[in-house]
Amino acid sequence: MVSLPDFIRGLPKAELHLHIEGSLEPEQMFEFAKRNAIALPFASVEALRAAYDFANLQDFLDIYYQGADVLRTEADFRDLALAYFHRVAADGARHVELFFDPQTHTARGVPFGVVAEGLLAGMAQAQRQLGVSSKLILCFLRHLDEDAAFATLREAEPWLDRIVGVGLDSSEVGHPPAKFAQVFRAARERGLKLVAHAGEEGPPAYVWEALDLLHVDRIDHGNRALEDDALVQRLVREKLTLTVCPLSNLKLCVVSDLAGHPLKRMLQLGLKATVNADDPAYFGGYLAENWIAVSQALALTREDLIVLAKNSFTGSFLTPDEVAGHLAAIDAYAAAQPAIA
Ligand code: ADE
Ligand code: ZN
């Protein structure tokens, strides 16, 4: 019999909620700062790590945007992506749909193409060397206005055939999905998939808006949807995937402890929940660590874990044939591992 951590690491799975800038480890931040001759406002890796103490989403975002300043060249973005893929491959990920925040970089004078080409090079290398497939999702920063999002979509045009969709992230409260209805419509008309962070700190009304005004294909987080029974019924009926991030929720005080995390309830309600890392370098764990921590805290069963793994592929933007292949791999794994110690 395998242990719970071994069962989880071996289980084929996808990661659907990962901000690549949030995988920038403190050591790597110092390395990039050195090679780009940038002075960091922290004396050491330890001092930087000690600053990762957040009371809410905004506390985190302030330090996350500051950290991203060390990313300047195509090689930086490629190396950042590759380091992440090595970690997530060891966690049993077979596929990743990763977010990037182009406005964080273009506002500093780093061209969109430098960011996109660097990330795409890392993704191609991960496919070749690690067998991990991936797709790229361009996120609009919701604390900026819709005109800025439109300008970013225009800048992205030459790369849109290699970008699967658009998302919406950054400071949620005070920046409802309605603010981005037109640019999401333009993205939809362009054939892009649509996702949005909603219900992380924001109210259930923001999840309704993401569905009704943005027409999203997935909800990122969605924790606060559970406060509204009619919304839960809608999400269940439409089989909307929620990309849930347990260690992020803990670090950003969305939940006070993991034992009180809503993941088990989401599964019991029939919601298509998945487990993801969000910003692993800042929140204390990559994909498997999220799975292990939340499984232990909520006493998830082997069957729950198999459902979560299947949800991660059925909720992905892979083709039906590709999804079917991954589901068959999960079934084969489950048959070979009939119990957890
Ligand atoms: N950007 C990076 N991580 C985020 C999160 N968890 N919520 C909103 N914006 C983000
Ligand atoms: Zn996120």
Image (cartoon, rainbow, N blue to C red):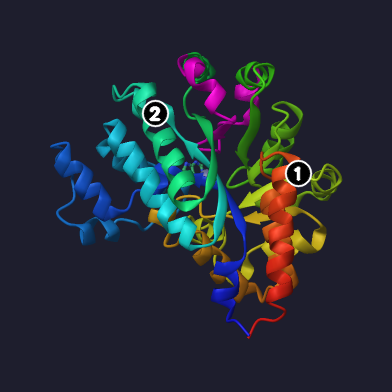
Q: Is residue 99 above or below residue 51?
A: above
Q: Dot 2, how many residues are within 10 Å of its Cα: few (below 14), some (14-19), or many (20+)? A: some
Q: Residue at x 49, y 45 (%)?
A: 127
- Image x and y of residue 3, in percent: 57, 81
Q: Quadrant of the C terminus?
A: bottom right
The mark found on residue 240 in the picture is 1
Q: Residue at x 36, y 51 (%)?
A: 83
Q: Is residue 239 above or below residue 185?
A: below
Q: Dot 1, how many residues are within 10 Å of its Cα: few (below 14), some (14-19), or many (20+)? A: some
Q: Which quadrant of the figure has residue 240? A: top right
Q: Which residues are magenta?
A: 155-182
- Image x and y of residue 306, in percent: 71, 65
Give the residue at mark 2: 117
Dot placed on the residue nearer the N-terminal end, 2 or 1: 2
Query: Which type of secondary structure does the marked residue at label 1 adopt?
Result: loop
Query: Which type of secondary structure does the marked residue at label 2 adopt?
Result: helix
Q: Is residue 172 left or right of residue 304?
A: left
Q: Is residue 168 magenta?
A: yes
Q: Is residue 135 magenta?
A: no
Task: Answer whether residue 189 is visible to the viewer in this image.
Answer: yes
The mark found on residue 256 in the picture is none
Q: Is residue 29 left or right of residue 192?
A: left
**Three-letter amino acid code at the position of disc 1:** Leu
